[in-house]
Image (cartoon, rainbow, N blue to C red):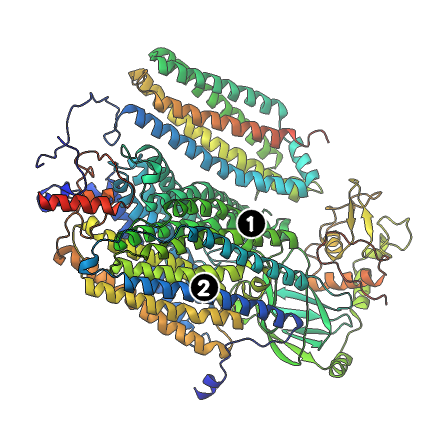
Amino acid sequence: MSDVTPPAGEHAHHPFLQHHFEDLTQQHEASTLGMWMFLSTEILFFGGLFLAYAVYRVSYEAAWAEGAHHQNLLLGTINTAVLISSSLTMALAVYFSQLGRRIATFVTLGLTFIFGSVFLIIKGIEYHAHYVEGLLPGAYFTYHSPLAAKVELFMVFYFSMTGLHALHMVIGAGLLLYFMWRAWRGDFGPEYYSPVEIMGLYWHFIDIVWIFLFAMLYLIGRHH
Amino acid sequence: MTSVTYHDVRLMEPSKTQNYLNVDYGFLSWLLTRDHKRIGILYMISISIMFILGGFFAMMMRLELLTPEGDLLTSDTYNKFFTLHGIIMIFFFLIPSIPAVLGNFILPLQIGAKDLAFPRINLLSWYLYIIGAFIGLFVIIIGGVDTGWTFYTPFSTQYSNTHVFGTTLGAFIVGFSSILTGLNFLVTIHRMRAPGLTWFRLPLFVWAIYAASIVQLLATPVLAITLVMLMVERVVHVGIFDPALGGDPLLYQHMFWFYSHPAVYIMILPAMGVASEVVAAFTRKKIFGYRFVAFSSLAIAFLGFLVWAHHMFVAGISVYSAMIFSFLSMFVAVPSAIKVFNWTATLYKGSVSWQTPMLYILGFIGLFTIGGVTGIFLASLAIDVHVTDTYFVVAHFHYIMVGGAVMAYFAGLHYWWPKITGRMYPEWWARVSALLVFVGFNLTFFPQFILGYVGMPRRYHAYAPEFQVLNVMSTAGASVLAVGYFLPLCYLLWSLRFGRKAGPNPWGAVGLEWTTPSPPPKDNFHETPVVTWEAYDYPAMLKAMGETQNV
Amino acid sequence: MMLMLTDFPLFPDQASTIASQTDKLFIFLCVVTGGTALLIFVTIFYLAVVYRRRPDNELAQEGEAPKFLEVAWIIIPFIFFMICFVWGSWLYFRLVRVPDNALQVYATGKQWMWKFQHPGGQREINTLHVPVNRAIRVTMASEDVIHSLFIPAFRVKMDVLPNRYRTMWFQATKTGRFHIFCAEYCGTLHSGMIGWVEVMEPTDYQKWLAGGSEGSLASQGEKLFQKFACNTCHTSEATGRGPALLSLYGSTVALNNNATVIADENYIRESILNPQAKIVKGFGPIMPTFQGQVSEDEVLKLLAYIKSLGAAPAQATGGGGPAPAKEPKR
């Protein structure tokens, strides 16, 4: 009984197996579950904004419609298409990483990164247009209309929601760069692909949030 | 190599083994550690500092309230003090207390894991806490904040000229610390349990932490986004919550309480978990109705999300929504009652030891019961109209949070102190402090129930003279309470150097944490334990102990 | 010190019709929960002593408390909780339903004072004179942050909001002075936002009313109505640029989005301060906002004036919430 040193070398250690996990399956399951839980937190985080948005849409329907009319539907639609495409390439990246196809993983991750960047650039162009129009809430808000105060509130929600979304995109893009480097290095294969998979979960989540934002900020109220 | 069971470790010489404390030395080995045990210690030190700070503000308030006139502090200072007392005690002490200190340290040991699922995220949680705390301290230094910890709009957005932005930013950041801790625990409990450790073999502390973590994960982000909107409103001056600009202050209250009511369960659920552990260990019995106690934790977590508007009965919600929230609030009382009755029934035919952790927990059950039943008063609409926003509410939630959560934190601290440090604290002094805390607490807060019903509103810097006698009693009690809290600080520190060596299992308790040396080795267990017994299986353990002695 | 000890209430004055009923429920709760808590404490103490650890009791004994207890202590407390719920809600309905014959008073909360106005035009600060044994209806709003009007002796409390009217009522049952507190934290002098209700015999109250008035609230409102030139659009004919206000109060108004709304106090207030929110069918959104131009006091006066133009004949006032009591036509 005196010998209680841990048994070494019972199973070959994968280089990316962290020491506190028993095996890669446990590690993979833990990281996937962790990401799902993180996303549930994110849903409630965005959910608070959605709730406040909904409350004031009911109260100030006309102003909300007026605000929606100041959104650039063309750019918004292009961005939606861009983001959905990026989800496709992201899903492909997960698929290729599982197969251990190094170059294909790298390229699809790269494409996802490019789509994401395009999205952010277009979003920036839209932001600039709002600024020029005087729709940036606060000191630069110069928009005139009987409903100006409520349109400003709409724009607060617009900038908060899309800004928060864009922040998630920027973080996602940074992670994509990191995983591109790791994919190039050949870290991923059939045994170990969970980082790419949870990156995929995160990216799809951002995508879905955008679908909601697009509907809420660009489309609803436009028929008025 | 045979499997190691709990009685084997009694034969080991703990002092000769390497442990998590002596494996590395130096500041960086602590500040960059990913060991859940060291992170638990880091939290313990940080929240103790915050507890002392929050306690200082409380003491100043009690001294001010010794006389009806506002003579010790100006009203602005008083308002800042009760605000800071609330913010520090809730966000920086109570929420992290049991989960981040005891949960961090004990939970992986209890489930036979080497660490939490995400050790780096665990360290990140602590750093987020520290960043939030430093912002909070910075705000205090540059002038404080006077909105009350609830940050009610439009006072907080347009009328207060104190540092609302900095404070909410601090709370926002510390919120993410809480979210990540909860997430880490949930994944750990799901994925890191030792072989054989099924859900219904888990200690009830794990169940309680699990339930609290769900609340942390799902409620905290709502507070975070609410505080973001509040900050935006304060900076941009747009009417999200400010009625002068078309916003709705009640929306703020709804969103705030959607977090802040469940937050009460973040504090009390882990406390209930500690109570279950201690009651089992100090009666040497399986908790009566184990499954009822386990599921009542989940029920509390679930129902806790459905009762937030009972904080708003007079605030302007409709008559029917008030009724619905009153009805649901009655439901949440049921699982709490189940727990109290089950702990009581566990004592029956037990081997009840009157050691310090048990004294604290007996106190906890008593105080929590009083806090719980006064919750029924508040859930009953007509009574709530009269007593809400009075000292009745102050007394009620202090019975839950201080009488409940803090008592249980101290119980857990004493119970696991030998495991954490490898040393015993002086039992006599510890019993004295448990007694002082209990007596001081009741003297402080029981008069406040009466004060509240007589009609003294809360957050009053000066008050009508007829309230003075009860206030004097309360302040006297607070001094006793302060001594009660100060004592453990002294003797626990003393025990670090002079305490008797504890050995792996000083209480003769079951549970995986008692099968490993004290202090535990860096990887917790020399060999991954395999669990073949139920939780709190004292007969089996005692039989095994008997066999060991015979060998 | 001696004086202090004699003046040491452990129970608040019972000075309203509701107070004694609230106290009954309170005492019921105290007895039942206190009894239960005491039972638990005694049981715990008894068990902890009887089964204390002794050399012959190092191990727990075999055997547990009977399992049916588990069901018992789920069901029995639950029944008690439901009693508390029903009783509390029943009383709450009485608390929010304003009697029809109630006397109207207006209250405005402001950092850090209470302003009261009577229909006869009497104004007072931090003191409210009311007659005994008469239901009093208080219509309240805040000029800045959230306050809460709390009269412990009457067991009534209600938050006072800056964006709409709240209504509470009470009926004092004895004469005397009773505390008014602000119960919702409102800033620096929150604890100074206190006052007194002076409950008087009806004859004394009439005498008090007779002293000092600047004309009835409605007539002051009429002056404001002209001062702000409301009458240029809101003429008495249906051809005005704004809707006619005759018999508006309590009537059902059709809006341009095909919804209808009851013209209660909150609707009228909103239409003054935020006219764009609800546009009457057939009219354009041309009315400027008076937010920031009229004080809460003045809104109350305008409201009193509009009410004095006659109330619509009694009809369903919707909601099931507290129905606004009709003002007697002047």
For mark 1, name the chain. Answer: B
Can you give x and y, in whole percent of width and height, for residue C131 in the image?
72, 77
Tell me the residue that label 1 is attached to. Answer: B254
Q: Quadrant of residue C51?
A: bottom left
Label 1: element kind: helix
In terms of depth relative to the viewer, which is nearer, A27 or B530?
A: B530
Can residue B76 be seen here? The reply is no
Q: Residue at x 55, y 19 (%)?
A: A81
Placement of B450 over or under A180, stated as above or below: below
User: In whole angstroms, how far apart are the C-alphas of marks 2 and 1?
Assistant: 33 Å
Can you give x and y, in whole percent of width and height, for residue A210 in the image?
54, 28
In terms of depth relative to the viewer, which is nearer, C242 or B304?
A: B304
> Could you classify mark 1 by the number of other residues whose Cα lies within 10 Å: few (under 14), some (14-19), or many (20 or more)?
some
Label 2: element kind: helix
Placement of B246 over or under C327, stated as above or below: above
Residue B402 shown left or right of residue C222 in the figure: left
> Where, quadrant-wise, is the C terminus of chain B in this rendering?
top left
Q: Residue furthest bottom?
A: C2
> Where, quadrant-wise, is the N terminus of chain B in this rendering?
top left
Query: What amino acid does circle 1 point to?
Result: His
Tell me the residue that label 2 is attached to. Answer: C36
Query: What amino acid does circle 2 point to?
Result: Thr
